[in-house]
């Protein structure tokens, strides 16, 4: 039997950067902040080392306050389609869950940030 949701993936890497974009709404004038994490992923192929640096948009409820640049983390993510216009769509990486892989079970983004 296939898994219920096959669009969930896990990856481990080092946090390279934590960019944040702030935009002001044209409707109500409020400022909204969109956070993301760029992971440094190292891999080997045919005796050569490669580094990939994908950017993961933080999903709702995912907080990054317990994680700093240079921390080694395990990130659970999904692929999300975003419509740019009617003829073009973009696939984004949406972070669903972040944890330090060397900690025992039960320690997740909420526990490390102090939020319940």
Image (spheres, rainbow, N blue to C red):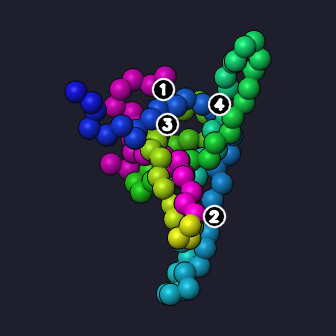
| 75 on left or right of 7 | right
Q: Which residue is mark 4?
A: 41
Per the rendered image, the range of residues in magenta is: 88-116
> Counting other residues with Cα less than 10 Å from the Cα at mark 2, is it few (<14), some (14-19), or many (20 or more)?
few
Please identify the residue farthest to the front as the structure is shown: 87
Is mark 1 in CB contact (under 8 Å) with mark 3? no
Query: Residue at the spot x=46%, y=42% of the render?
Result: 77
110 relative to 47, above or below: below
Q: Gap in Å between the C-alphas at discs 3 and 4?
A: 11 Å
Q: Which mark is residue 75?
A: 3
**Magenta-drawn stretch contains 29:** no
Q: Which residue is mark 1?
A: 101
Q: Which mark is residue 21?
A: 2
Q: Secondary structure at mark 1?
A: loop
Q: Gap in Å between the C-alphas at discs 1 and 3?
A: 9 Å
Please identify the residue farthest to the right as the structure is shown: 48
Query: Residue at the spot x=55%, y=60% of the render?
Result: 89
- Seen from the viewer's position, the closer of residues 33 and 54 is 54
111 relative to 63, above or below: above
């Amino acid at each position: 039997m296939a898994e219920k949701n096959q669009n969930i993936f896990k990856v481990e890497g080092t946090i390279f950067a934590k960019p944040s974009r702030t935009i002001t709404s044209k409707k109500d004038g409020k400022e909204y902040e969109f956070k993301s994490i760029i992971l440094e992923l190292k891999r080997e192929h045919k005796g050569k080392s490669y580094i990939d640096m994908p950017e993961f948009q933080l999903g709702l409820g995912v907080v990054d306050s317990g994680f700093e640049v240079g921390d080694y983390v395990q990130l659970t993510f999904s692929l999300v389609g975003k419509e740019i216009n009617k003829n073009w769509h973009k696939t984004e990486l949406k972070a669903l869950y972040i944890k330090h892989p060397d900690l025992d079970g039960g320690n997740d983004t909420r526990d490390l940030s102090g939020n319940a």
